[in-house]
Image: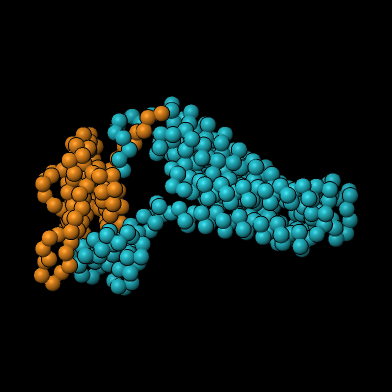
Amino acid sequence: MDRLLGRLIQALLPPQWGEALLSEAEHVEPGWPRKRWLAGGVIAGLRARLKEGVMPVRWGAWFGIAAAAFLVAYTVWRYPAAAGGGGGPIYLSLVTVLLLGYAAASWWVTRGRAGGHRGTQFGVVAAVVAGLAAMPYGLTIARVAVLPLAFLAVLVLLTIAAIKAVRDSGSPVQALIAGGWAGALAALGAFIWGMAMAVAAPQRLAVDPSVAASHGGADLIAANLGEQSVIYILGLIAGPMLGVFAAVIGMVIASAKRPRQSTMRSVV
Amino acid sequence: MSRRTSLSPQTTAVMRLLSEAPDRWWHGYDVARRTGLKSGTLYPILMRLAERGLLDAEWEETQPSGRPRRHRYRLTAEGLKVARSLPEPAMRPHRLAWGDA
């Protein structure tokens, strides 16, 4: 057990600090106190990795973007009529450009920017909230109650990300990055979860009246799926825009509500 | 907007302890016992303080018999200045360290 924890510490912490923690462990009483010391070292390593966590975040974002692209490709392959209408090529082009833009943005944002760090922290939570709210069955079952609450929750999360970013860095630009990035993650979460649920069981989607009027039979489900997908595609634009809006609110709040006591520069 | 952030209570506790005997070199376990912090909290603080130039960290010169050399820590002049500018604590750390009970 101690050896396993030691290996994890060496893998997670910078070499000098891993060695420091392990050599210190030799001076801790054997048994549970030493195990607790080593387990704490693993936590310290995980924290250090998360703090610097540029690569995991970047790869995570790219994995999400790839998942979204896969869902689009699968929809077109499995339900050709979903992209068969007049708007099909336009929306397919739009979603391609947007996902490529998201990939480029995730590379840029995760290059050690304070706003990127805060945006990721709150954006992941916002993505879960937005994903759950955007799932077609959530909308169908409790449209009135869930959607405004989820929207409000996402807006609050994006605003907090911006406030934290501006307090970390003192830079309004970082607040905009945090808000925009968190909004992008929320939109990506909604896209993936909503599309996955819609593709898995398109017959359970509420039928759009315009689709019902112009389609029949097997094409009805596919065309309806295509109509619903547009919401998630447009969400990829709306998410970052909402984030920028939240960042402006966050900056106003941050400048109005200054820390009460300390005037110390950010040292830790 | 100015860049203002207060220190966390844990970081404050570490800096306050180290500033009590500024010339003394402290070991990680001693700091953990005296502040009541666990290693998972203490080491990220030590790493950040060292990164910001507020903490000197070095290996012991002599090796204790049968045990590896330890890392030891002391505030730098800048760290000491920061520690001495800290406001009085509203509440002292109340948790006992392991083995203190």
Residue drawn where x is 89% and y is 56% of the image = A216
Place of residue B17 in the rendered image (x, y in percent of width and height, measured from the top left): 17, 46
Q: Viewed as shown, does residue A252 lie left or right of A184? A: left
Number of numbered markers: 0
Query: x, y percentage for residue B101?
Result: 17, 58
Q: Residue at x 56, y 47 (%)?
A: A105
Q: Indicate whether A10 appears above or below A236.
A: below
Residue A10 lies left or right of residue A83; in this view the side is left
Viewer-side residue, A68 vs A190: A68
Residue A60 picture location, percent across and down? 53, 57
- State the residue lying farthest toward the top: A256
Question: Chain letter for cyan?
Answer: A
Q: Left or right: A240 with respect to A86? A: left
**Relative to A249, residue B8 above or below:** below
Query: What colour scheme governs how the chains and residues are painted in the rendered image of this protein?
Result: by chain
Q: In front: A175, or A131?
A: A175
Give the quarter of the figure containing the C terminus of chain A: top left
Q: Residue at x 21, y 65 (%)?
A: A23
- Looking at the image, residue A33 sits to the left or right of residue A98; the answer is left
Quadrant in which the N terminus of chain A is drawn: bottom left
Q: Looking at the image, can residue A57 be seen?
A: yes
What residue do we see at 36% from left, 62% from top? A12
Q: Which chain is orange?
A: B
The reply to whether residue B33 is visible in this rendering is no
Question: Residue A64 in the image: x percent, y percent?
Answer: 58, 56
Q: Nearer the viewer, residue A232 or A20?
A: A20
